[in-house]
Every structure is written in C-alpha cells, then in structure tokens.
Amino acid sequence: MPEAADPCPVPERASYTAREALVIETDAGNAEAARLTAALQALLVEKGLLAPGEVDQEIEKLEAPGIHLGARLVARAWVDDAFRTRLLADGKSAAAELGMKVGEAQLVVVANSAREHNLIVCTLCSCYPRSILGQPPSWYISKSYRARAVREPRAVLREFGLDVPAEVRVRVHDSNADMRYLVLPMRPPGTEAWSETALAGLVGRDVLIGTAVASVRPEALASPSGPC
C-alpha cells in the first residue's frame, strides 16, 4: 500500500543557516519601531496618561549608568585582594562600598582564570546589569546570540575575535530577573605598577560580558605606570 500523506509535513528549511548573523535587527526594522513608539507616546500624551518629556526623562535615568562603573569594580578588585574576595562573594554589597547602587535583585560576579572563561547571556529576554553597565548592546538581546551563546559558545566567541584555547573551559551564565552576572577578567601582565584609574581604562563592555578579554597595547606598556 502507498504511504499516507503526512498531514503535518515539515517545511523545507533550505534557507536556514546555522551561522546567522549575531545582530538580527535591521535599520528598517528599528526605524519602524521608532515610528510606532513615537505614535504611541503622542497618543498617551494626548489622552493625559503621559506628561510631555516624561519618556525622555526616564530614558536619561536608564542610560545614566555606564560601563565605567563596571570598570571601576574590576580595577579595584585587581589592586585590592580583600575587595576582590568581597566582590565575588556578594557583588551588590561590594558595589555599594564604591557608592554604586545596584538596582537588580542580585549581582553575581564570576572570575576568569587561566583554566576558565566566563560568558554572560540571557536566554529568556534581555536581563542585564543595567545599573552597572547601562543599556545592553543590540547583539546581546538578539535571538541569535541568546540561542547560540548556550549552544556553541566557542563559535560565538570566535566571531567576536576571541579564540579560547581548547584547554580552557568556557562557562556560560544565564541571567534572569533575580540574578545578573558580571565578568571579572584576568588582569593583563605588565600592569603591576599601573594606577587604578589606568587599569579601569582597560575594561570595556565586551570584557565585562565575556566576549572579549582585557588587553594592553604594546605601546602602553612603555610607561611603567600606564597611560597618562
């Protein structure tokens, strides 16, 4: 007897690519979202549900924190072993020591080492330590990064230009509404005499997420105390 036709055939997936771009947003899509947002905001203002300028004020509050706060935490941990211990034990309390108010429920700081590299992701949505790092980059909230960072972290890191040696374990941390993660990178060699301020300048956003490592330009090492 001939086989019965499948009532729910699987669609062809010839167009699927396992290596889709990390950033899936497009300029056209962002522009359309901006138009819709502006229209909704105007409607809410017209109905008296929102005050003019209220959205801009809230956005300014959200964007006030920046990566410099996370960089300060790392730099202090690099020069103060006792602070490093407290930071790894309770990130929120350690941040408070430097006058930083962490709005998230819990801040977990994970340390890179010669044997382990940490990578941060939020597979559910876009959970991110905004009170320490500000707003997340677009690629962090893209569906591609959220899925692939867990499934094939080494391949994702290579696309960021970071090739983690095979003998180094890659550990992926999934942020959620109650717990946000921050990477404590390894201190670059040759910076032993650098000031805390100079060290903070080595720590960028991607380093704190785990898609990059802290490094020093060769010319910067010419000065024992770091760049001026």
Image (cartoon, rainbow, N blue to C red):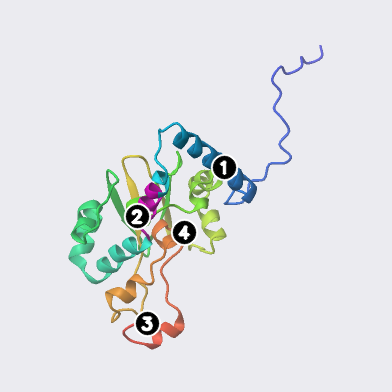
Q: Secondary structure at mark 1?
A: helix
Which residue, given by chain and number where applicable, does mark 2 sit on?
182
Which label belongs to residue 227? Answer: 3
x then y, percent, for residue 113 = 35, 63
Q: Residue at x 47, y 34 (%)?
A: 46
Which residue, given by chain and number where applicable, does mark 4 sit on?
211
- For the residues marked 1 and 3, what is the alpha-carbon distance in whole angstroms? 42 Å
Going from N to C along the chain, the mark reached first, 2 or 1, is: 1
Going from N to C along the chain, the mark reached first, 4 or 3, is: 4
x then y, percent, for residue 182 = 35, 55
Give, as a single range, the part of the protein colored magenta: 57-66
Q: Quadrant of residue 47?
A: top left
x then y, percent, for residue 3 = 78, 16
Q: Residue at x 20, y 63 (%)?
A: 83
Q: Is residue 98 above or below residue 187?
A: above
Asked if disc 3 and disc 2 are in contact, CB closer than 8 Å, the reply is: no
Q: Give the foreground label among 1 and 3.
A: 1
Q: Secondary structure at mark 4?
A: loop
Q: Give the foreground label among 2 and 1.
A: 1
Which residue, given by chain and number where applicable, does mark 1 sit on?
33
Asked if disc 2 and disc 4 are in contact, CB closer than 8 Å, the reply is: no
Going from N to C along the chain, the mark reached first, 3 or 2, is: 2
Instruction: Inspect the image, locate mark 3, and give the three-letter code of the amino acid beneath it.
Output: Pro
Going from N to C along the chain, the mark reached first, 1 or 3, is: 1
Q: Is residue 4 above or below residue 111?
A: above
